[in-house]
Amino acid sequence: MPDAGGQAPVLTPDLCVIGAGSGGLSLAAGAVQMGASVVLVEAGRMGGDCLNYGCVPSKALLAAAKRAEQARRGGLGVAPAEPQIDYAGAMAHVQAAIDAIAPHDSQERFERLGCTVIRAAGRFVSPREVEAGGQRIRARRFVVATGSGPFVPPIPGLAETPHLTNETLWELRERPGHLAILGGGPIGMEMAQAHVRLGCRVTVIEAATPLGGHDPELAAVALDRLRAEGVEIVAGKAERVSGAPGAVTLHLEGGGEVSASHLLVATGRRPNLERLDLAAGEVEHTPRGVTVDKGLRSTSNSRVYAIGDAAGGLQFTHVASYHAGLVVRSALFRLPVRAKDDHLPKVTFTDPEIAEVGLTEAGAATRGETVEIHRAPFSGNDRAIAEGETEGLVKLIASPKGRILGAGIAGPHAGELIQIWSLALSKGLRVKDISGHVAAYPTLGESAKQAAGAYFRPRLFESPMVKRVVRLLAHLG
Ligand SMILES: Cc1cc2nc3c(=O)[nH]c(=O)nc-3n(C[C@H](O)[C@H](O)[C@H](O)COP(=O)(O)OP(=O)(O)OC[C@H]3O[C@@H](n4cnc5c(N)ncnc54)[C@H](O)[C@@H]3O)c2cc1C
Ligand SMILES: NC(=O)c1ccc[n+]([C@@H]2O[C@H](COP(=O)([O-])OP(=O)(O)OC[C@H]3O[C@@H](n4cnc5c(N)ncnc54)[C@H](O)[C@@H]3O)[C@@H](O)[C@H]2O)c1
């Protein structure tokens, strides 16, 4: 209600959360249900990137593409058949998936929970106050949860040439004839496979290493399949872009060219900080995000936290939610918290999927740590054999004394199979804990036991000592 001077009274909640995406929504829901007063500020769509432009649409399109590929591949006694692709129908499935999840993230739901929701851009007006839609908010604590957007590199001609990003791709209804994708990271490669399976010609242009964020041995499993399905991966860096709607050309350093009907730019992310006026809030930041300490608190304004993509670290929905949980403990209960990375899984949803958690083989080498690497290929897993999906492996990184340091999987449902390893790392489990549990047969989940078994095999089956003990005990009757 405006005061006599026509000004809305200043809101004074416990928490003001700026950004209603993966991190902001988890935090707001947790805090308000624990009795805190919460103002939630959202400039765009409730649900943020993950729901509207990221995880949900990309996984929905990949699912449609997988159906097409299964028909095309046939096998196991089923004749392959070229599927009839309805690209608009696949995009309708994408929208239906978003619509089905949207009520959970909606303004109405958060208002029912007790949050005050303001649909406007928030900006700091002082170290103690944020303004959004004409409303001033003087909260006890502020949380920057504004996420990230596509980073479009300053390549000459790119800004003037029609191009798609993860924010606009979902508006397409006509299938691109030839999709060029600049950047071969998770976004580029997931969308490359989705589109090649939906019948497009696809060329990925990658300046460094395709899927370079993953262990190369695991990435190779997915890259081999992508190439076999027809994705062309060109090593190169675009130095100029030109073209018009329907005909785009990337001019590469050293002279090559890639021409396509459409261009998707997937060259990384930049945090959404520009509208926040962080200087007014005395909140230090870099091009990667808000500068925070181990407890996710701004190093320059202790009233302010940053979570999720805006905090400059790993950029995943589950990381944003994990951050939210830490900030609930810190801001509401004043408990000391420390954000860690070593138990956070990362999954790329190509088919086969790639999933990793904890230390990698390269990471161990960089740290000069002595580790054992054990592998369990899916060709030795009965369920994988029965389903004709034997590409890939589980890779266990363990200390010589049996501590689990990391795990990586490339193969069918790797994103599901990584969960037991995430649990193992977060709870400090040992290899014997994995080998000792009973896994149902026949499941892909047995692959965890098989990798743990690879650790114990030489110790049990190739040990003269074990053999001596067994013989001695047998002698005793
Ligand atoms: C194509 C793609 C696929 C992805 N797939 C996966 C996946 O499969 N799994 C996974 O874990 N992660 C995935 N991610 C990453 C995931 O989407 C992000 O890590 C996650 O959304 C980050 O959550 P967040 O809360 O930090 O930001 P967001 O979810 O982006 O939310 C930030 C919100 O803040 C709002 N905002 C920005 N500025 C302001 C302002 N000044 N005032 C008010 N509101 C503001 C924005 O409108 C937005 O709604 C994907 C990303 C992309 C782009
Ligand atoms: N499955 C998932 O969880 C998932 C899926 C998609 C995205 N994400 C998140 O979003 C983040 C961003 O993904 P992304 O793929 O956009 O970024 P990325 O930074 O992971 O990959 C971008 C790629 O583009 C390349 N590149 C950059 N500039 C280039 C140029 N001028 N020419 C050619 N290549 C160039 C880089 O070498 C890099 O390989 C991911 O790191 C991840 O955190 C997660």
Image (cartoon, helix red, strand yellow):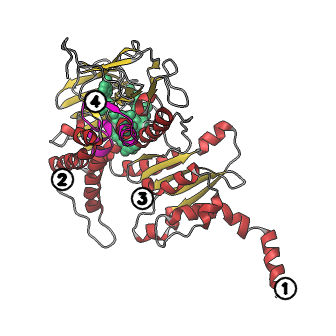
Q: In which quarter of the image is residue 471?
A: bottom right
Residue that label 2 marks = 85
Spot the residue most to the front: 4
- Sooner in the amino-acid sequence: mark 4 or mark 2: 4
The span from disc 1 to disc 3 (Cα, nearest Å) is 48 Å
The residue singled out by tag 3 in the image is 412
Label 3 vs label 4, nearer the camera: 4
Instruction: From the top left corner, tell me how far across and down residue 160 is, in percent.
Output: 23, 20
Pointers 4 and 2 in contact (CB under 8 A)? no
Spatial CA distance of label 3 from label 4 is 37 Å
The span shown in magenta is: 28-57
Identify residue for label 4: 42
- Mark toward the viewer: 1 or 3: 1
Residue 344 is left or right of residue 51, and the answer is right
Pick whichever, 366 or 319, lies toward us: 319
As shown in the figure, which amino acid type bears the numbered disc 4? Glu
